[in-house]
Amino acid sequence: MPAFICITCGAQYPPADSAPKNCPICDDERQYVGPSGQNWTTQEKLALTHFNAWREYTPDILGIATQPRFAIGQRALLLRTAHGNVLWDCISMLDAATVTLINSLGGIRAMAISHPHFYTSMSEWSRAFDVPVHVHAADRQWVMRPDGQLKHWEGETLELLPDVTLIRGGGHFSGSSMLHWAKGAGGRGILCASDTAYVAADRRHVSFMRSYPNLLPLPARNVKAIAAALEPFAFDMMFGNFFESVIQTGAKEAVRTSTERYLAAIAADASF
């Protein structure tokens, strides 16, 4: 039986004779159902028209995304740490070429996903590489295919591997998480934030939203909580959720100044 994949958000569902009637992730106010209604595909159909592309940011940080753009354009990161490879976030498409390439680079030691818009085909990736996939327990209701080696982590931080820490920021979703690699970028430290803190088009600032496609702002208390969660961690390079979403240097100061800018913009007495 096929495991149907939502075309709009990329979430994969358990194998079934027919497609689900709806996608709860897209029905939520943070996502959307397109004007043509709910539509579905499968890995097999996706492979007829798409392929996975790679981008090397540094020799130890590789991006993976499906081309032409699929779902919301998600990009995963393969982090090649001294203690094993980490897959941060996930994409829907998993083909033989991707499995071969990742295995040739040493496979995957651990997986972690930022939030439900990146759950995609995480269970299928987990099984393909025989690896646990970590998602925050606060978002367990959004797991549409609860199989594979799924681990619901709790609390505010989790050491995934030595020098690699998951950080719960909340905001976009209650369990929205980020990944800090202390020795990444030649020891400068990197932050993988997905869109908990969204890398802006100028690549010098970040911003915050409850819903990006529906333009729902994030309340001040949530933004302050994200900033507070990041304060103990040193990082100079930062990755968002798309191929181009990278702050090459000065990322921690960018988060700090962007937080101040955002809070000033949504203040009750703000004027422009």
Image: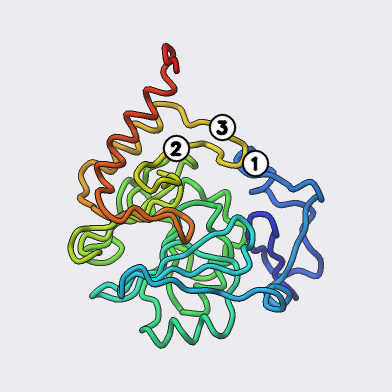
Whether residue 196 is visible here, answered yes or no, is no
The type of colouring in the image is rainbow
Residue 249 as seen in the image, left or right of residue 38? left
Badge 3 vs badge 2, beta-carbon distance below 8 Å = no
Write the residue at 44% across / 13% down.
268
Q: Amino acid at mark 2?
A: Phe
Q: Which mark is residue 28?
A: 1
Q: Which mark is residue 193?
A: none
The answer for how far apart the CA atoms under marks 1 and 2 are is 18 Å
Q: Which residue is mark 2?
A: 208
Q: Amino acid at mark 1?
A: Asp
Write the residue at 64% across / 49% down.
25
Q: Which mark is residue 216?
A: 3
The answer for how far apart the CA atoms under marks 3 and 1 are is 12 Å
Q: Amino acid at mark 3?
A: Leu
Label 3 sits on a secondary structure element that is: strand
Give how far across and how far down residue 49 sits, in percent. 70, 75
Give how far across and how far down residue 36 sits, in percent. 81, 50
Label 2 sits on a secondary structure element that is: loop
